[in-house]
Amino acid sequence: MQTYVINLDRQPARMARMAAQLGGAAFERVPAVEGRNLSGPERRVGEVPVRAEELTRYELALVLGHKAVWERLLASGEPACCVLEDDVLLSPDFLEFMRNDSWVPNGASIVKIEAGSRRKVFLGPQETEFKERALLPLLSPHLGTAGYVIASEAARILLERTAPVARPIDHLLFEDLLTDEAFKIYQMAPALCIQESKMDAAAPLQPEFQSTIQSKKRKSRLSIRQRILRELTRPFVSTAGAIAFVLSGGFAKGSFRHVGYR
């Protein structure tokens, strides 16, 4: 399975670190989009964006970087690929999984191979297992796009849906799509990779792993007009998802658990 690494031109140290972790295995670097060269807000104000004009320039850049990978996957003619951001730590087992794609569940659209947050996520019953790692349906939001496997058909649909871009990439893939019948989203547990910043919150990061995404939420008082407009235009993604989950008997299908990383 081809591996793509998204990397900013001004971050050669990160790319060198990734190349070392990949141990000489074949991979392709995909230039990340430079957010500071795009138009849009510098920082997020208020809730998670639901319209194109609400995305920060850095959130937009991240989506464009992932779209570039999806385009390369479709051009390659391959059935799937692995997408990595350049600030992840890889498991020693990573290359073995990339050599053999038999572990990917049949019909899977996306498999998240990243540990993500330390919070428990709701996962469905185990469907397959490979090298003591389970592949389970992802049933609750699990944000982060530092590592995932995506099928070409899923990439094709997503390219169509992200013109124009209106949602941060992790909310799109690992929140919005969870209640979309066109997609089957899975989580690997334990995961094959984790972002350096989530490995040990108490430890200072190496310079090459300091965040280049300047989109952290900053509290700001919205005017009455802005608040009214926000509520009138906000799609009911989370509410509708929760209702669909309960009506489908979702709580009977799985359990909350930590994903972990090994």
Image: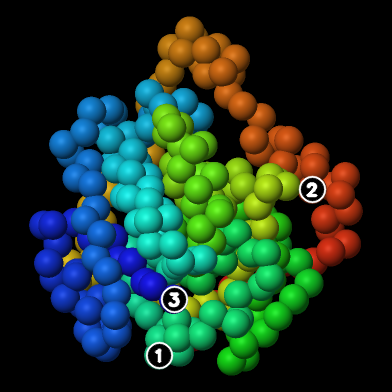
- Examine the image and state in which quarter residue 69 appears: bottom left
Query: At 45% from the left edge and 86% from the top edge, which residue is drawn?
Result: 99
Query: At 73% from the left edge and 47% from the top edge, which residue is drawn?
Result: 181
Position of residue 211 measured from the top left corner of the image (x, y, whole percent): 26, 56
Mark 3–mark 1 CB contact (< 8 Å) = no
The amino acid type, in three-letter code, at marker 2 is: Phe
Horizontally, is 41 left or right of 51 in the view? left
Position of residue 1 measured from the top left corner of the image (x, y, whole percent): 44, 76
- The tag on residue 92 is 1
For numbered disc 2, what is the local secondary structure? Answer: helix
For numbered disc 3, what is the local secondary structure? Answer: loop
Residue 201 seen in the current view: no
* Number of other residues with Cα within 10 Å of mark 2, as a class: few under 14, some 14 to 19, many 20 or more: some
Sequence-wise, which precedes: disc 2 or disc 3? Answer: 3
* Number of other residues with Cα within 10 Å of mark 1, as a class: few under 14, some 14 to 19, many 20 or more: few
Q: Is residue 221 above or below residue 178?
A: above
For numbered disc 1, what is the local secondary structure? Answer: loop
Inter-mark Cα distance, 3 to 1: 17 Å
- The tag on residue 1 is 3
Q: Is residue 180 above or below residue 112?
A: above
- List the single residue furthest toward the top: 225
Colour approach in the figure: rainbow
Q: Which residue is mark 2?
A: 245
The amino acid type, in three-letter code, at marker 3 is: Met
Between marks 3 and 1 in the image, the one whose residue lies nearer the viewer: 3
Position of residue 18 measured from the top left corner of the image (x, y, whole percent): 25, 76
- Examine the image and state in which quarter residue 64 appears: top left
Residue 15 vs residue 207, the one in the foreground: 15
The amino acid type, in three-letter code, at marker 1 is: Pro
Between marks 2 and 3 in the image, the one whose residue lies nearer the viewer: 3
